[in-house]
Image (spheres, helix red, strand yellow):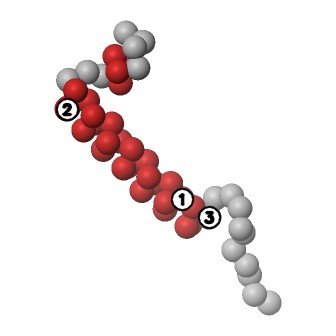
Amino acid sequence: METQEPKFGFTRFAETWNGRLAMLGFAIGLATEFITGQGILSQLGLM
């Protein structure tokens, strides 16, 4: 009997891409703060 990997939920493929995109977003956030000299809250007008 074959075991099928679930199509939804916490699959290895989904978690790998989630981690990669999270790291990309974090790097873009740091670069934006470095370039503008303002934090994210200042950029959004909350501070």
Disc 2 on helix, strand or loop?
Answer: helix
Residue 38 sits in which quadrant? Answer: top left
Distance between the alpha carbons at the discs numbered 3 and 1: 6 Å
Amino acid marked by disc 2 = Ile
Distance between the alpha carbons at the discs numbered 3 and 2: 36 Å
Residue that mark 3 sits on: 11
Amino acid marked by disc 1 = Glu
* Label ID, residue 33: none
Which residue occupies the foreground of this view, 41 or 6? Answer: 41
Between discs 2 and 1, the one toward the N terminus: 1
Place of residue 41 in the rendered image (x, y in percent of width and height, measured from the top left) = 38, 19
Quadrant, the N terminus: bottom right
Residue at left offset 20%, top offset 23%: 37
Residue that mark 2 sits on: 35
Place of residue 21 in the rendered image (x, y in percent of width and height, measured from the top left) = 44, 52
The reply to whether dot 2 and dot 1 touch (C-beta < 8 Å) is: no
